[in-house]
Image (cartoon, helix red, strand yellow):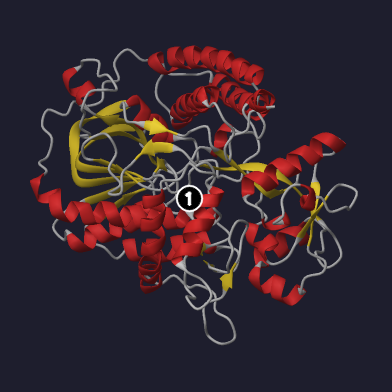
Amino acid sequence: MNAEKKVHKTDFLIIGSGIAGLSFALKTATHFKNASITIVTKNKKNECNTKYAQGGISTVWNKTVDSFEQHIQDTLIAGDGICNEDIVKMVIEDAPTRLKELIDWGVNFDKNKKGEYSLGREGGHSQDRVLHHKDITGAEIERALIEQVEKAKNINFLTYHYAIDLITEHQVTKKRITRKEKTTCFGAYVLDEKKNKVKTFSAKVTMLATGGNGQVYSTTTNPVVATGDGIAMAYRAKAEISDLEFIQFHPTALYNPGEYPAFLISEAVRGEGAILRDYHGKRFMQRYDDREELASRDIVARAIDNELKKSGTPNVYLDCTHLDYDAFKKHFPNITEKCLTLGIDIRKDYIPVCPAQHYICGGININKKAKTSIKNLYASGEVTRSGLHGANRLASNSLLEGIVFSHNAFYNLTKRFHKIEFPTNVPQWNDSGVVKNMEKILITHDRNEVKTIMSNYVGIVRSNERLLRAEKRLLNLYEDNKRLYDHSELSTDLCELRNLITTAYLITQFSKNRKDNKGGFYNADLIKKEL
């Protein structure tokens, strides 16, 4: 591998190509017509968590039956007392305007026979307020946004480019920076995967929109690119990070051993009236929550987990047999087709499901303007802890979060961008002293070990002993990987492993320090103390 002997200058460096990154790019490109915008993504243009969002995006659209107050209250209840109420209010009240922008950009949301937008309901919502495009809403949003981005002449979209680390004073001065010191982001080091070269990007503004880290778990609905890169990069750059213990497990991933990532059976299916049944066909949610199947995700996931442990069976079932098949097929064509490929006819067969890691509710701390604790570094979407989700995300609030905070970042920069100057003395990547890494099996083995550790010890239900075991094993993996990283030629899989270990360790540490059970965090030993 070679480091390019030049520094690439760009006004805006955007890392990630989901709804948060693309909407930010579009707005900056339109407003700052003479500015250069660079988007880097480590895979294809549309390979991101947004693409796989099935259910939709929530907003108060029908104000005759719904209201901001109801959506706010539903979000606060789901967040289990950890949400920032001011942030929740801001996001929800801004939602209709941001949704109209998506529609103006060409996103096609489903309409009913009257020509009105078809609104769905998911777990935790008290009203029908989820706009959707069949059961591939995220893919439709990606399609429309990429189409708009490709029209912008001042956006440079770099696929198969992997961001390794942010550049701050640490690289410039070669001095160790503490987490309490004020730091500035000057850009990032980026691996051109096809040319096998590390590029140095100098930027006035850097936006982290890298999504989540589902790949730390053995069973996840997240795509293989969700390796916690943004959180890990920000942590190494000494950004403030919080609430990583709150991991949301989606209750109903399709149980299909050997398929990875897990295929998601949307929350909206239960919103349409589907019923959960145990392995023997009996309903059980009434024993756990008055809302039954429409309880929030943390409650439904723990209920299923408890049923599986009691019965020793691998899955429960989702019963759709009583639903209108034609309406179901129209709303959920991909789910219907996926089930048919496995011999499941939802008109007469139950769908086997089990929980899978789905979303991380914590991340890089940002304020209302999407600013991080590092100057000129913004962040938006699942990579952040904005205060919207609290301890547990309300279904279909995630796409909304990304587009609102990206707008806020853009709006803030309309006022301050002209004051920001290009950084000077940005050092190029130093690749001296490394040797070619021939033992890829070490990376594969360690990646699988991270997944096993997290699934066994830091899953839906945790305990003090499990967390202690996870911490010890992850520390050993960290030391082994640091030695490998320091002396080996860089590759995407080596860098991803570095980030997976970092985020897994951080989740474990935050879990150890949590003193009460909230939302997506549940420690069985804390229940014993309360009793």
**Secondary structure state at the residue bearing disc 1:** loop
Query: In this view of the protein, which residue sits in the foreground, 386 or 491?
Result: 386
Query: In this view of the protein, which residue sits in the foreground, 210 or 434?
Result: 210
Residue 96, percent from left and from top = 40, 68
Residue 453, percent from left and from top = 63, 23
Q: Is residue 260 visible?
A: no
Placement of 100 over or under 469, stated as above or below: below
Q: Which residue is mark 1?
A: 47
Furthest residue toward bottom: 114
For the N terminus, give its image quadrant: top left
The crowd level at tag 1 (other Cα within 10 Å; few <14, some 14-19, many 20+) is: many
Placement of 451 over or under 296, stated as above or below: above
Q: Residue at x 56, y 50 (%)?
A: 78
Q: What is the three-letter code of the residue carrying label 1?
A: Glu
Placement of 366 over or under 73, stated as above or below: above
Location of residue 487 (image quadrant): top left
Location of residue 299 (image quadrant): top right
Location of residue 239 (image quadrant): top left
Residue 436, percent from left and from top = 42, 18
Q: Is residue 383 visible?
A: yes
Placement of 260 over or under 481, stated as above or below: below
